[in-house]
Image (cartoon, rainbow, N blue to C red):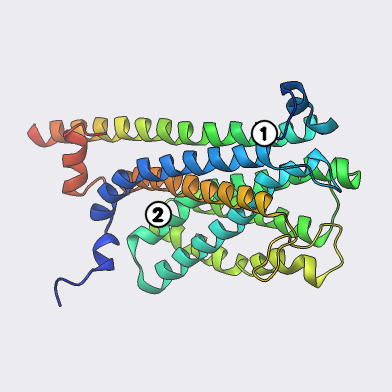
């Protein structure tokens, strides 16, 4: 079922290893970091909006 | 007729926000499942290509990324048209939420294309119609993001950005048909409805990865649009309640 004879064969990609893994590596890096960046931005935004909300309620209370 | 499914109901940020939140884990899970199966078939099961050796395996991300880069742009242009025609609030936010993912897909298309071109054509880059129009697509994404970020009033930003998206949409068919219209170094399409030039197992792997990229893009765009909704609707009572309730 598995096409490769050994793991080193798989890594070598018939001599195209640099090109194949260069493609897959950068894709994996981007698709792993994008959701993390989105989550970080979300956290920062929520924290900022909460601060603004608290500041607002203080001024209306006073 | 009040029980009829009402699309306008979900066009309101207040109802779309929780809906998107519930859907994100499903799309993320589907992205992971389709991606793992697709890569398993493509990288471990599929045989070698008789012309390109193992180098052809770049196709399993190159084609899905290229498709997504074009498709996301079309979806953004669709939202731009809806926003300009009906002045709906959510449309502009949807377009903004999709743009970074579309830009990354266009970048990945070019990056994997360069890494594929080098061993097969002997060059990272040529100014051929397919490659050049895809580069223009990347610039359109970046231009759109820069434009909407530079305009302080978000609704005006949406309108200006929407106009740019609609003008730029002419580029998408140019990318798609470039290999037919011009004599390009880039090969013609490997997949079409009538007859595909790819072996079936390779085609399946590619389609599964494409499906995975699709689910991934929806999940990321939904996550991004939820943050945009909170920012823009911060004066609405439901957002204040959401923030006070400390729900994620």
Which residue is tagged 2?
B93
Which residue is tagged 1?
A2
Residue placed most toward the observer, B76 or A4:
A4
Q: Position of residue B85 (x, y in %)?
A: 40, 74
In this rendering, the answer to whether B88 lies above or below B119 is below
Q: Is residue A38 in view from this perspective?
A: yes
Residue placed most toward the observer, B242 or A26:
A26
Query: Residue extending furthest bottom?
Result: B1
User: Which image quadrant for residue A7?
Assistant: top right
Q: Residue at x 14, y 34 (%)?
A: A57
Determine the secondary structure under disc 1: loop
Q: Dot 2 surroundings within 10 Å: few (below 14), some, or many (20 or more)?
A: many
Q: Residue at x 33, y 47 (%)?
A: B23
Residue placed most toward the observer, B57 or B68:
B57
Q: Residue at x 71, y 37 (%)?
A: A23
**Image quadrant in which the C terminus of chain B is located:** top left
Q: Is residue A4 left or right of residue B246?
A: right
Q: Residue at x 53, y 31 (%)?
A: A33
Q: Chain of mark 1?
A: A
Q: Is residue B124 in view from this perspective?
A: no
Q: Chain of mark 2?
A: B
Q: Is residue B121 left or right of residue B8?
A: right
User: Which image quadrant for residue B144?
Assistant: bottom right
């Amino acid at each position: 079922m598995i096409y490769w004879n050994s793991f080193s064969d798989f890594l070598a990609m018939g001599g195209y290893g640099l090109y194949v893994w260069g493609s897959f590596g950068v894709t994996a890096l981007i698709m792993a970091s994008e959701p993390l960046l989105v989550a970080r931005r979300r956290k920062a935004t929520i924290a900022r909006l909460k601060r603004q909300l608290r500041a607002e309620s203080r001024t209306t209370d006073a | 007729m009040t029980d009829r499914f009402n699309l306008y109901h979900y066009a309101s940020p207040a109802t779309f926000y929780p809906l998107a939140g519930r859907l994100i884990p499903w799309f993320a899970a589907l992205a992971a499942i389709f991606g793992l199966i697709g890569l398993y078939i493509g990288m471990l099961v599929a045989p070698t290509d008789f012309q390109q050796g193992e180098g052809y395996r770049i196709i399993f991300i190159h084609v899905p990324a290229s498709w997504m880069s074009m498709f996301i742009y079309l979806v953004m242009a669709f939202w731009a048209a809806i926003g300009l025609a009906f002045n709906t609030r959510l449309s502009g936010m949807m377009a903004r939420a999709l743009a970074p993912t579309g830009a990354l897909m266009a970048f990945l298309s070019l990056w994997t294309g360069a890494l594929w071109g080098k061993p097969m054509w002997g060059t990272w880059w040529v100014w051929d119609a397919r490659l050049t129009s895809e580069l223009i697509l990347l610039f359109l994404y970046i231009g759109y993001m820069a434009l909407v970020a530079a305009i302080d009033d978000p609704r005006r930003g949406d309108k200006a950005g929407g106009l740019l998206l609609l003008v730029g949409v002419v580029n998408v068919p140019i990318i798609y048909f470039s290999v037919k219209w011009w004599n390009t170094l880039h090969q013609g399409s490997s997949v079409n409805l009538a007859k595909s030039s790819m072996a079936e197992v390779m085609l399946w792997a590619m389609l599964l990865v494409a499906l995975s990229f699709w689910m991934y893009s929806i999940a990321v765009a939904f996550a991004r649009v939820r943050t945009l909704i909170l920012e823009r609707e911060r004066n609405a009572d439901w957002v204040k309640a959401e923030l006070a309730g400390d729900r994620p």
